[in-house]
Image (cartoon, rainbow, N blue to C red):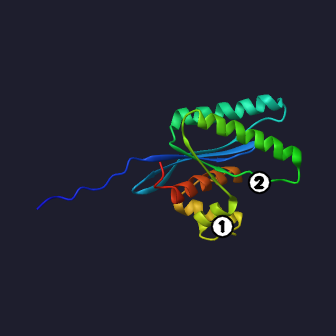
Amino acid sequence: MTKSKKFTQTPSRILGIDPGYGRVGIAIIEKTNLGEKLVYSECFETSDKISHPERLSQISLQIEGICNKFKPDKMAIETLLFSKNVKTAIKVAEARGVILAAVAKRKINIFEFNPNTVKLAVTGYGKSDKKQIINMIEKLLNIRYKIKHDDEYDAIALALTCSATKEFMK
């Protein structure tokens, strides 16, 4: 009789990014055959007292540092939503571009998701509200501490969405 070998999957690290200009949600989850685990999350903030180019530089440096430290093999980012405030939309688009460039330099696979897809993947309902999403994230990842900003939860939700929907893609 032969012993069955337990299947072990090489862990995958997924970087979730909720792009923003003043605040950027950042999360790293690790996926194995045992499920997902939150490795790191934060809400990175830039100061409105520094110049626009300096803020973009800070965002780029933060993302580069996260990539260097955690070595993700995938990134999930929210698609750009058009805003009534054109100035804000342009700044967020520029921040998103800086993030994409920082990640692409490292040859990390990038996946984009719209908010309804994220809601559906995390809660099973594409029109879930923020409270339902947060509740499900806390249950799925067994989070026992208070996360201060929604941007951080959004980044975690994006990483979970990538894990759930892109698990067979390299």
The answer to which image quadrant residue 101 occupies is: top right
Closer to the chain start, of discs 2 and 1, is 2
Identify the residue at image location x=61%, y=54%: 158
Q: Quadrant of the N terminus?
A: bottom left
Report, in whole angstroms, how far the alpha carbon at label 2 lies from the one at label 1: 21 Å
For residue 165, above or below residue 27:
below
Dot 2: element? loop
Would you say residue 149 is visible in this rendering?
A: no
For residue 4, above or below residue 14:
below
- Position in image of residue 128 (x %, y %): 68, 68
Q: Amino acid at mark 1?
A: Gln
Q: Which residue is mark 1?
A: 132
Q: Nearer the viewer, mark 2 or mark 1?
A: 2
Mark 2 closeness class: few <14, some 14–19, many ≥20 residues within 10 Å: few
Dot 1: element? helix
Q: Which residue is mark 2?
A: 81
- Position in image of residue 24 (x %, y %): 70, 43
Q: Which mark is residue 147?
A: none
For residue 53, above or below residue 16:
above
- Position in image of residue 161 (x %, y %): 57, 58
Q: Amino acid at mark 2?
A: Leu
Mark 1 closeness class: few <14, some 14–19, many ≥20 residues within 10 Å: some
Q: Is residue 82 left or right of residue 150?
A: right
- Position in image of residue 115 (x %, y %): 69, 60
Identify the residue at image location x=58%, y=60%: 138
